[in-house]
């Protein structure tokens, strides 16, 4: 695991560019980045990579980062998403220097568009959206000039002013740049930069009915904020010539440089906001913060730690080649962080009753059990031992071979932090199912191994007379294949029906003395956190599994891949 005191990225091509820029005095030695999400959904694991990269590299080079909401599409955007995004970024551990909205620049963007019209570099086009597509040509054939490309400057200024005044219906006109309809780069074939939308904006209200498009807005916003290094994923690499062309035509205060890096492709996930919203709308999940979702809100609710996600983003590195990352790497980062920081407790998820027949009914003991086997500074907790206990059903068999290291009829096992017990008999229900195991405990074995007897192993338990009822939710990947987006089948047909499993069991009472947000290792089960949203109708505790212990996680993936 990366040293918590060393949050730097390993040397990479972007840091090399920044190093060279500072050495040459470019941008006066400044480094200023920005994170520009569109507020039309929740941030996800792919955004986490971009957040860590923008904020992390800026910090390493003594620079700063802006948060800018790309709010140029009011039909899909909402203030609620902006609030959620701020919360997620802060939860990851970052703080922006300045916050802006693209809508802050609407007047400036409009004025720059007017200047482009006056310079003969933009024109109002009255083709329909379908006609514009047909005129654009193909990758092997040049496009065709719009019949409106030759409109005079005066006519274009008049039409654009009337567009702003609201005289035309949606789609009647667009403002396009006049670049090159024969360009080999499709993005330079007279791209549209303004369209008519009679929609109220969540920041500007009804002040505007024309809205700028992303490629035009983004580069100018970067320049106005004097961003030095505009980092984006490789999907925008073909857009860089347009980014540079727009800035070259205008008198703007900054000279930002666009640099592309590979986007994150994490196994068993989809990160398209459209698809994530579809999962919610069609009730495959319960919301943006469902613990199975790859959103930061879902990961936070599931119990992932901010440090583990930052560590994960550092480990996958910064390259231009595709990142197809195994889920195991993310789980490893989480598990390593929690192994050191999570106190231990005992929970029985699939309970089976055990009665200690030689433990008197009136007898009771309070055991002191360490909260962490390797960290005495975490102290210890009181665990009550009573006549009746619960163990996990998988921890008992009537017969078993030598590889089975748990309780077997006629043989011994140790209770974690307590005594050695021997199974002497069972009680069954009318269907022949075991409902209770009768055991004898050895009072001389607290912290001592019995002489001359071989104990099979150690199992966890809770007192049946002094425990807390709880629901436990365990998770598998949301999809049954590593890369659902790469399959020809509809991704919704690849959803894992066992992605969430619920168990009714018990947890030791000591967990009630810990903060609700405390993460635990429930011994021999996995890492868990109390759900901060749901509670059962009876008001009992609900615990989400954060990540399994290593062997259980590997077993789960092997099962999925064999199905």
Image: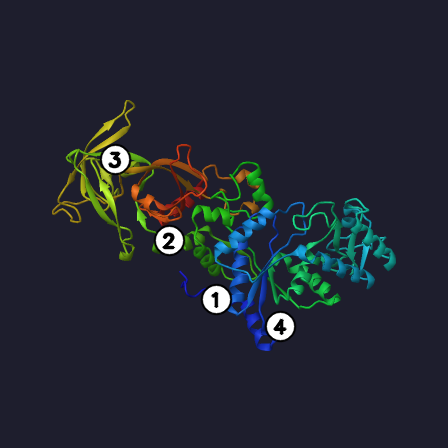
Specify whether residue 107 is in view. yes
Quadrant in which the C terminus is drawn: top left
Q: Secondary structure at mark 1?
A: loop
Q: Is residue 33 left or right of residue 297?
A: right
Q: Are marks 1 and 4 in contact (CB under 8 Å)?
A: no
What separation in Å lies between label 3 and label 1 (alpha carbons)? 53 Å
Q: Nearer the viewer, residue 442 or 529?
A: 529
The residue that disc 3 covers is 465
What separation in Å lies between label 3 and label 2 (alpha carbons)? 30 Å
Q: Which numbered mark, 1 or 4, is in the foreground of this view?
A: 4
Sequence-first tag of 1 and 4: 1
Residue 27: mark: 4
Q: Nearer the viewer, residue 105 or 173?
A: 105
Sequence-first tag of 4 and 2: 4
Q: Secondary structure at mark 3?
A: loop
Residue 338: mark: 2
Residue 496 location (% of width, % of height): 48, 39
Residue 153 location (% of width, % of height): 86, 59
Specify whether residue 318 is in view. no
Name of the residue lying farthest toward the top: 430
Sequence-first tag of 3 and 2: 2
What separation in Å lies between label 4 and label 2 (alpha carbons)? 42 Å
Q: Secondary structure at mark 4?
A: helix
Q: Residue at x 71, y 58 (%)?
A: 216
What separation in Å lies between label 3 and label 4 (alpha carbons)? 69 Å
Residue 555 location (% of width, % of height): 38, 45
Does 493 sit above or below residue 60? above
The residue that disc 1 covers is 10
What separation in Å lies between label 2 and label 1 (alpha carbons)? 24 Å
Q: Residue at x 27, y 29 (%)?
A: 435
* Mark 4 neighbour density, 10 Å: few (under 14) some (14–19) many (20 or more): some
């Amino acid at each position: 695991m990366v040293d918590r005191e060393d949050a730097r990225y390993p040397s990479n091509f972007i840091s090399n560019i920044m190093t060279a820029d500072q050495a040459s005095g470019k941008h006066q030695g400044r480094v200023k980045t920005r994170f520009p999400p569109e507020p039309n959904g929740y941030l996800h694991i792919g955004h986490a990579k971009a957040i860590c990269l923008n904020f992390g590299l800026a910090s390493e080079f003594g620079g700063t980062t802006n948060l800018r909401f790309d709010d140029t599409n009011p039909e899909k955007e909402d203030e609620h998403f902006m609030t959620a995004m701020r919360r997620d970024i802060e939860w990851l551990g970052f703080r922006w220097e300045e916050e802006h909205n693209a809508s802050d620049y609407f007047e400036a963007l409009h004025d720059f568009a007017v200047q482009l019209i006056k310079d003969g570099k933009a024109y109002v086009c009255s083709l329909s959206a379908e006609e514009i597509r047909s005129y654009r040509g193909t990758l092997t054939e040049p496009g065709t000039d719009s019949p409106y490309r030759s409109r005079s400057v005066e006519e274009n200024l008049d039409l654009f002013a009337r567009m702003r005044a609201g005289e035309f219906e949606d789609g009647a006109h667009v403002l396009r740049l006049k670049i090159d309809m024969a360009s080999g780069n499709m993005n330079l074939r007279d791209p549209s930069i303004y369209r008519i939308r009679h929609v109220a904006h969540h920041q500007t209200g009804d002040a505007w009915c024309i809205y700028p498009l992303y490629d035009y807005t983004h580069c100018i916003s970067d320049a106005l904020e004097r961003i030095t290094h505009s980092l984006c994923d490789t999907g925008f690499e073909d857009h860089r010539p347009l980014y540079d062309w727009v800035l070259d035509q205008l008198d703007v205060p900054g000279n930002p440089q666009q640099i592309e890096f590979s986007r994150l492709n994490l196994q068993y996930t989809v990160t398209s906001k459209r698809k994530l919203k579809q999962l919610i709308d069609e009730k495959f999940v319960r919301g943006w913060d469902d613990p199975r979702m790859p959103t930061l809100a879902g990961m936070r609710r599931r119990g992932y730690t901010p440090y583990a996600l930052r560590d994960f983003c550092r480990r996958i590195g910064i390259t231009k080649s595709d990142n197809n990352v195994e889920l195991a790497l993310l789980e490893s980062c989480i598990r390593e962080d929690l192994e050191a920081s999570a106190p231990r407790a005992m929970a029985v998820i699939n309970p089976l009753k055990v009665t200690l027949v030689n433990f008197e009914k009136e007898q009771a003991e309070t055991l002191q059990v360490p909260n962490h086997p390797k960290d005495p500074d975490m102290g210890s907790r009181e665990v009550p031992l009573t006549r009746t206990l619960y163990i996990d059903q998988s921890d008992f068999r009537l017969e078993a071979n030598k590889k089975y290291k748990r309780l077997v009829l006629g043989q011994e096992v140790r209770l974690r932090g307590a005594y050695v017990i021997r199974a002497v008999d069972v009680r069954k229900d009318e269907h022949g199912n075991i409902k209770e195991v009768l055991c004898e405990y050895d009072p001389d074995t607290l912290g001592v191994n019995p002489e001359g007897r071989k104990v099979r192993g150690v199992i966890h338990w809770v007192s049946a007379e002094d425990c807390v009822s709880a629901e436990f939710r365990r998770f598998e990947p949301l999809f049954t294949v590593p890369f659902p987006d790469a399959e020809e089948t509809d991704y919704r047909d690849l959803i894992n029906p066992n992605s969430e499993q619920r168990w009714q069991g018990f947890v030791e009472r000591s967990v009630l003395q810990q903060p609700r947000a405390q993460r635990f290792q429930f011994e021999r089960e996995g890492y868990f956190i109390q759900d901060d949203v749901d509670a059962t109708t009876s008001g009992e505790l609900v615990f989400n599994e954060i990540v399994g212990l290593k062997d259980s996680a590997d077993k789960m993936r092997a099962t999925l891949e064999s199905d």
